């Protein structure tokens, strides 16, 4: 029921246009407000493809899952026109609308219906160069009107749909896996062209042993195959999916996370779109928040070439858009086509032609595997499309902070690997100096375990690419063991397990720590680092924390003012005791500086080295050896 606004809503078709700020600039997205919306009558949903509209009411299908993203089809496929076919019964009207890239809405056509009727609208895609959607509204007369079905159709020679290998990588997420397998089994149309459904199980809690597995396996009619594999991370699991898709002769490898809820229709849409693309194209779905179902986490991503960080394709876009507060027709930036560098592997379909040509994933365990692959494909002439109307609901990152803790190693190392291979700048833009500033912030925040993980990342990076496959099964246990040596990485779920906090001196003027001004930031930061390096830790701070700090207040400029503090984790499940250690700080800061200096000095040499090794370390042959060593024997 809480996902209904993504499929149908009752807002006004066009809304009220508000004046834009800036003297009538034509490039400013239109701002619109709808009239008061009524709650959708979910009890009127007759089936997955049919609904009733009550007398005198109006519903719109100008929604995320039901509007037609015309600009994407115009730009990337051979389709130049579509036909909207709506089958209805009862008396009412079918009204067709379109938008442009600026979010301006226009009425296109309408027809009155009475009794059983099929209304067809032939619609060109020519006006959709930079963006825009088609959709339709239904208005009931004095009696209900029922939409029996509706389709977006295209003329052309019938083409045999491509065959898909759908692969899910999992690590101890048995409930999620069983749920998704059940969803897929209940929607056989979505699996019609799935040649094989592969579950790469890298966990200790095996999906095959979970309650309900035998039932869903039987319902999947022999399409399901489980591969037990050592924990080689997301890149190891997804690379296995790519490998198996090539080996079994599929046209596509569809990669999917385990902690998602899939919209089965998305599989059909990804396949239809990919089959009609002008050139082999990676096609991915968007990600909604699993625990806030109407919130779209991301609509598309690029890699900023200078900072070499994930970024949004345009300044107008926002992360975490809630369709409940602003529907598709009200939100101007959603109408501009978002051209991307990559799509997250929570749901991403890759043609096996591309895999055969450019190889499998980088052997990097987790982080940056999907972004690097998109950049690699782009360099080879193969685009990526994040396609509206295809999506999964994924566990959100709101309650995670993977820049702190064991994942920091993979963030740091893998970002550098991707930059060494793909950065267009001589020394990687600002990636090296930004990385060092991150280390300093972690260190003055007393996050020594995280900083040590990042130092390990640089050591392994400088060691070269040849050892990447060998590190896949061993690096995570090594990092976890290292983390146990640092109090900032040791968590307790009991809030009373730490001494009560107490400050030796009250805060100045009764205020807590405040952020430095922009003008005074550099001298303030320098003074703070000097104090952290040289000032001894008060004996009282060794025996008890000075403060309890909530996760959202865990900022470097605040933490750098304490000698010790108990800090909550992002999930809210526990806290750890941060303790300042000047000796540790001096050692780590010096080593970080040395490693970053070495990286900067040898950037060009390392770049050549990683680029030269890329073909080998991502090859089918190299991955085949890794799979053979860490899973069931591969038969040739």
Image (cartoon, rainbow, N blue to C red):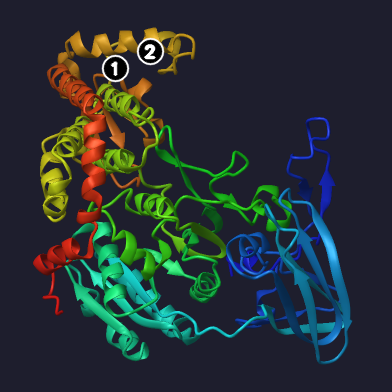
Point out which mark residue 313 bears.
none
Q: Quadrant of residue 261?
A: bottom left
Residue 426 appears in view? yes
Q: Quadrant of residue 509?
A: top left
x then y, percent, for residue 173: 29, 66
Q: Quadrant of residue 214?
A: bottom left
- Label 1, residues with CA under 10 Å away: few <14, some 14-19, many ≥20: some
Q: Nearer the viewer, residue 477 or 374?
A: 374
Q: Give the residue number, with chain letter if any, for mark 1.
A: 503
x then y, percent, for residue 271: 49, 74
Q: Is residue 497 left or right of residue 250?
A: left
Q: Nearer the viewer, residue 205 or 164?
A: 164
Residue at image position (48%, 57%) is 383
Helix or strand or loop: what does disc 1 sit on? loop
Q: Is residue 618 left or right of residue 634?
A: right
Residue at image position (13%, 50%) is 471
Q: Mark 1 touching mark 2, by CB under 8 A?
A: yes
Q: Give the residue number, with chain letter if any, for mark 2.
A: 507
Helix or strand or loop: what does disc 2 sit on? loop
User: How much space separates mark 1 and mark 2, taking CA atoms?
Assistant: 8 Å
- Label 2, residues with CA under 10 Å away: few <14, some 14-19, many ≥20: few
**Quadrant in which the C terminus is drawn:** bottom left
Residue at image position (48%, 46%) is 302
Q: Nearer the viewer, residue 482 or 242?
A: 242
Residue at image position (24%, 14%) is 532
Q: Is residue 175 left or right of residue 494?
A: right
x then y, percent, for residue 575: 27, 39
């Amino acid at each position: 029921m809480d996902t209904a606004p993504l499929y149908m809503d009752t807002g006004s078709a066009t809304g009220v246009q508000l004046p834009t700020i800036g003297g009538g600039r034509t490039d400013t997205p239109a701002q619109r407000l709808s009239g008061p919306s009524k709650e959708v009558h979910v009890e009127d949903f007759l089936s997955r493809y049919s609904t009733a509209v009550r007398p005198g009411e109006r519903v719109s299908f100008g929604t995320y899952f039901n509007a037609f993203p015309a600009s994407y089809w115009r730009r990337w496929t051979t389709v130049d026109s579509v036909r909207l076919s709506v089958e209805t019964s009862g008396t009412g009207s079918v009204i067709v609308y379109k938008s442009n890239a600026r979010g301006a809405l226009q009425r296109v056509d309408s027809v009155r219906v009475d009794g059983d009727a099929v209304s067809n609208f032939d619609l060109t895609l020519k006006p959709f160069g930079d963006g825009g959607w088609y959709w339709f509204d239904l208005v009931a007369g004095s009696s209900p009107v029922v939409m029996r079905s509706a389709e977006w159709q295209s003329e052309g020679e019938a083409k045999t749909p491509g065959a898909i290998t759908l692969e899910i990588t999992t690590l101890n997420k048995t409930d999620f896996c069983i749920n998704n397998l059940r969803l897929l089994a209940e929607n056989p149309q979505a699996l019609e062209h799935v040649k094989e459904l592969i579950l790469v199980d890298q966990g200790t809690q095996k999906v095959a042993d979970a309650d309900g597995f035998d039932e869903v396996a039987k319902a999947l009619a022999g399409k399901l195959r489980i591969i037990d594999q050592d924990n080689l991370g997301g890149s190891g699991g997804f690379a296995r999916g790519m490998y198996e898709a090539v080996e079994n002769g599929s046209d596509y490898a569809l990669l999917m996370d385990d902690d998602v809820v899939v919209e089965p229709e998305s599989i059909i849409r990804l396949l239809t779109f990919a089959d009609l693309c002008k050139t082999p194209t990676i096609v991915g779905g968007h990600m909604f928040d699993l625990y806030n179902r109407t919130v779209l986490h991301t609509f598309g991503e690029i890699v900023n070439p200078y900072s070499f960080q994930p970024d949004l394709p345009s300044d107008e876009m926002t992360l975490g858009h809630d369709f409940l507060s602003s529907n598709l027709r009200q939100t101007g930036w959603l109408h501009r086509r978002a051209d991307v560098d990559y799509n997250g592997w929570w749901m991403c379909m890759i043609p096996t032609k591309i895999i055969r040509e450019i190889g499998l994933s980088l052997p990097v365990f987790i982080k940056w595997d999907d972004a690097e692959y998109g950049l690699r494909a782009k360099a080879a002439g193969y685009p990526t499309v994040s396609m509206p109307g295809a999506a999964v609901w994924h566990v959100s990152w709101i309650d995670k902070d993977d820049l702190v803790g064991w994942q920091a190693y993979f963030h740091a190392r893998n970002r550098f690997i991707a930059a060494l291979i793909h950065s267009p700048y001589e020394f990687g833009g600002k990636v090296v100096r930004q990385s060092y500033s991150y280390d300093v912030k972690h260190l003055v925040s007393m996050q020594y375990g995280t900083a040590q993980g990042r130092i390990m990342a640089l050591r392994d990076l400088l060691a070269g690419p040849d050892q990447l496959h060998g590190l896949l099964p061993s690096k995570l246990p090594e990092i976890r063991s290292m983390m146990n040596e640092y109090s900032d990485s040791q968590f307790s779920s009991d809030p009373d397990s730490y001494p009560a906090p107490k400050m030796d001196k009250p805060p100045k003027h009764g205020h807590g720590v405040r952020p430095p001004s922009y003008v005074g930031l550099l001298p303030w930061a320098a003074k703070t680092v000097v104090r952290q390096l040289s000032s001894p830790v008060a004996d009282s701070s060794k025996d008890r924390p000075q403060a309890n700090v909530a996760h959202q207040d865990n900022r470097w400029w605040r933490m750098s003012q304490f000698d010790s503090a108990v800090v909550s984790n992002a999930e809210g499940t526990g806290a750890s005791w941060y303790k300042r250690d000047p000796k540790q700080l001096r050692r780590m800061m010096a080593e970080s500086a040395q490693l970053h200096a070495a990286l900067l000095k040898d950037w060009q040499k390392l770049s050549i080295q990683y680029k030269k090794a890329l073909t080998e370390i991502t090859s089918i042959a190299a991955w085949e050896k890794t799979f053979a060593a860490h899973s069931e024997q591969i038969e040739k």
